[in-house]
Image (spheres, rainbow, N blue to C red):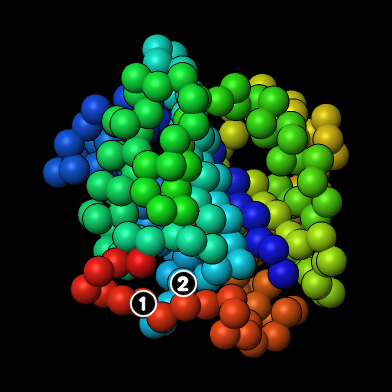
């Protein structure tokens, strides 16, 4: 089952110009974005190959907003620790900062400039998409959807008014994962668990062994 996750990152400097020693401060909570990225893909001794994560870095221009798209199929050099994941994403932003086109910054990771609202609109229109909010009714997935599943969630800030408007316009179902307000990375853990439960044990095709020496 194809799993699509869209994470809205509101505060990370789009240029990638911040220190890895200050991810939570000057990095605009890149620590949480890195953790969410790790959570989206890593499992014990493997990677989720059926998952795609898009991060929209929507901080105000200049420069323009950037999109990082990671695909489990073909993804390499994603190690389980937060700092190296933050470095992978930061390096991609830095490389993209002078380019007006998409580039594969590392295997399975594409970065490029983006108009966030049209992209969000496109994502929202895909079948099976939900919007994670603390206020929604409980998310009760029952059967795997042939077209796959997708979820939109936000970083330490809630979606901005124009982002909310797009999601509402497309009537993306607002759902809650429980009564407690969670961190984005925790939401992804819960979400995968719900999807794992309805899908059953993922086959070997959905995972691949971790090679911790060379990264994956
Ligand atoms: C840290 S929360 C956002 C900030 C939070 N609303 C606050 O009051 O500070 C990050 C995101 O995770 C998602 N989220 C957090 N808890 C959730 C829950 N219980 N159910 C569904 N989504 C949740 C939402 O998308 C939210 O925007």
What secondary structure is found at the residue carrying circle 1? loop
Classed neighbour count for the residue bearing mark 1: other residues with Cα under 10 Å, few (<14), some (14–19), many (≥20): many
Q: Quadrant of the C terminus?
A: bottom left
- Does residue 114 lie above or below 196 as drawn? above
**Which residue is label 2 attached to?**
47
- Residue 32 appears in the rendering: no
Would you say 19 lies left or right of 166 here? Answer: left
- In this image, 55 relative to 174: left or right? left
Which residue lies under the disc numbered 1?
210
Residue 98 locus on image (x, y percent): 34, 19
Instruction: Tell which residue pokes out farthest to the top in this image.
Output: 62
Q: Position of residue 167 (x, y in %)?
A: 75, 35
Q: Is residue 168 left or right of residue 49?
A: right
Task: Work out whether mark 2 precedes mark 1 in sequence or the reverse, and give the earlier one.
Answer: 2
Residue 150, given in percent of the width and then of the height, sits at 70, 54
Q: Which numbered dot is residue 132?
A: none
Instruction: Give the camera-side residue of 46 and 22.
Output: 46
Image point (36%, 77%), residue name: 210
| Quarter of the image where one finds residue 138 | bottom right
Is the residue under label 1 in contact with that under label 2 (CB below 8 Å)?
yes
Please determine whether, in this image, residue 66 is positioned above or below residue 140: above
Q: Nearer the viewer, residue 200 or 111?
A: 111
Q: How many dots with numbers? A: 2
x then y, percent, for residue 132? 66, 51
For residue 202, above or below residue 93: below
Q: Residue at x 59, y 76 (%)?
A: 206
Q: Which element is circle 2 on?
A: strand
Q: Is residue 70 left or right of residue 116?
A: left
Q: CA distance from mark 2 to mark 1?
A: 7 Å
Q: CB of residue at label 2: within 8 Å of ligand 1? A: no
Q: Is residue 96 visible?
A: yes
Crowd tier of the residue under label 2, counting other residues whose Cα lies within 10 Å: few below 14, some 14–19, many 20 or above = many
């Amino acid at each position: 089952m194809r799993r699509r996750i869209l994470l809205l990152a509101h505060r990370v400097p789009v240029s990638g110009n911040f220190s890895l020693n200050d991810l939570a401060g000057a990095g605009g909570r890149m620590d949480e974005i890195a953790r969410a990225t790790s959570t989206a893909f890593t499992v014990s001794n493997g990677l989720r190959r059926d998952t795609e994560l898009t991060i929209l870095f929507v901080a105000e221009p200049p420069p323009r907003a950037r999109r990082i798209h990671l695909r489990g199929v073909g993804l390499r050099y994603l190690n389980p620790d937060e700092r190296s994941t933050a470095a992978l994403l930061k390096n991609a932003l830095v490389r993209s900062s002078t380019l007006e086109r998409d580039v594969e910054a590392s295997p399975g990771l594409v970065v490029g400039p983006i108009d966030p609202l049209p992209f969000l609109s496109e994502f929202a229109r895909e079948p099976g998409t939900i919007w994670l909010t603390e206020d929604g009714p409980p998310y009760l997935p029952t059967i795997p959807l042939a077209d796959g599943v997708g979820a939109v969630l936000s970083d330490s800030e809630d979606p901005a008014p124009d982002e909310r408007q797009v999601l509402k316009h497309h009537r993306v179902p607002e759902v809650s994962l429980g009564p407690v307000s969670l961190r984005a990375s925790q939401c992804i853990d819960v979400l995968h668990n719900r999807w794992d439960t309805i899908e059953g044990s993922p086959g070997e095709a959905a995972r691949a062994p971790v090679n911790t020496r060379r990264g994956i």
